[in-house]
Amino acid sequence: MPTPTPLTGYTSYKGLPPLAGLCTLEEAARPGLSVEECVRRLKRFHYCFKRLHQILTARITAEPIYELKTAFAHHAYLCAEHVTALRTRIGEMREPPLGLEDVPHPALEAFFDEILAAPTTEELLWSVYTTAISELNRAMRDYLGETNPLTDAPSRRTLRFALLELDDIGRWGWEAVHALAVVRQSEMLPWSRLLDDLLCAAGGIEGTRPETGDSITRRYSAQPYVYDPVPQRDERFSDPWNQGVNAESFLYDPAKPARAKALMMLYKRLREIDVPEMMASIITQTPGKPWGYYRDMTRQLWDEARHAMMGEVGFVALGVDWTKAKITFNWSYRLNTECTPMERHGVLYFIEQGLMPRTGKRYEFEVARDSGLPLMATLQDFDWADEVLHSQIGRAWYVPQFGSLKESLDYGDAAWSKVLSNWATVKERGLTQHENWWPAVYAMACAAEGVQPDAVVLAFDETYEGKRADLQRIAAE
């Protein structure tokens, strides 16, 4: 019997594009992947995004380079969003139980374990961006080319959005690799071959290639990866223990002018790089939660990294060298090394609640607006919106673990008090002299603007040790 050709002589009505613009009739008439095969591959993509989220989050804290910390935070968030989208799509394809926590293949698990355990920044960048991201991108494009564009339109939409951001991630990664890792490519070649061998053993990212069946010896992941909770900073952070300036005391002093307060708020924003360092520890060291927990917490982590970059941009826009401000890691270091993950979350939520009254984020926005610096108003407007969202995330995932809102706040207050009880000890250990860096930074901003520094502002000298009283006052109001 001859093969039917139903499209012969078919013309669209009045020349209208057919099939809602998804594809041509010829493309839709070609058989594609079965539902079973679609689900199998989508589960692999889901696993890859989930492991990349895990890797990037876990490596934020101990990565010294600021630009990498913020990029890892961003890319981890994007991966979390695509995990969420894939979970939704797979759940639509008659697949109960979903099995989304299963490992698709032991060699694929080993592949990502090796990347997680990469001992250097160069190897981490190389393996994440030139190998894992690149291979995932290729596999997803192959899927788009093989599945039926009409019958599997929802999956194609999910992957097309993912590929837009995967392309962005990949471009950034190649630039970072070129900047930091290119000189060590020859040294990384044996390990790069091991990663390729693991992918071959797994049948590729999507599992469509012949599996080699080879027995492969792990290298870096021969011993299970151990998360490093100690924050690291690059050489631009010259005195990360410094608590010589009490930003909160300056900001809430009615005698200080709004324009100078705006500069101090930029310091507060840039200082927020310690929040992703700490939140990465909560996410990494809190297993067994529903996926929504990790997605929402990673969104907050990314927002905090974005706030730090907002501070960076603000300094640059004002002609100020931000490295002259002493951006500390005291908070993330102390919480990560002295508190449990639950206590860290409690401190995070307790501080967030102090930002919600009128004397919190609304006040910062009003100061920014009154400063006469349009960029400052924009930065604080969005910072305020983000913090409201973060408070809601805390109410969704932290507060329900207690009998009441008061109990949850008391727990966070107690954990914060434990940390603050010996806050000044770093000076006694000779780690810093708590230098007052504010006059130099303020004078730099005034010089860039061509104005004379205000003597009262220039003379500000109050240490950070009054922070607890400031926070308690703000929360009470």
Image: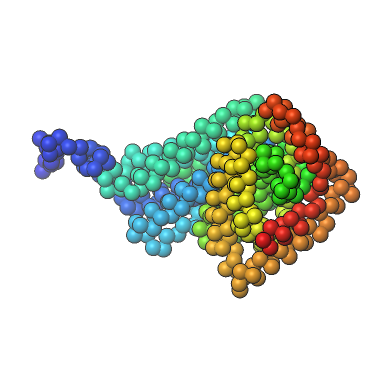
Which residue: 55% across, 36% down?
129
Q: Position of residue 463 (x, y in %)?
A: 81, 47
**x and y, in percent, of residue 190 in the image:** 62, 34
| Residue 451 visible in the displayed image | yes
Residue 68 in the image: x percent, y percent? 63, 38
Q: Quadrant of residue 380?
A: top right
Q: What colouring style does the render use?
A: rainbow
User: In which quarter of the view is residue 122 placed?
Assistant: top right
User: Which image quadrant: the N terminus?
Assistant: top left
Q: How many marks?
A: 0
Is 64 situated above or below 280? above
Q: Nearer the viewer, residue 474 or 291?
A: 474
Quadrant position of residue 349: bottom right
113 on left or right of 237: left
* Residue furthest bottom as drawn: 403
Which quadrant is the C terminus positioned in? Answer: bottom right
Q: Quick check: can you spot residue 209?
A: no
Please, is residue 358 above or below residue 64 in the view? below
Taking the spot 67% from the left edge, 42% from the top edge, the residue there is: 258
Q: Is residue 119 left or right of residue 207?
A: right
**Residue in the foreground of this view, choosing between 434 and 65:** 434
Please tell me whether residue 103 is drawn above or below residue 211 in the rendered image.
Answer: below
In the rendering, at what x and y percent does residue 468 appear? 76, 57
Q: Residue at x 39, y 38 (%)?
A: 141
Q: Which residue does the image show at 59% across and 31% down from the upper left?
A: 176
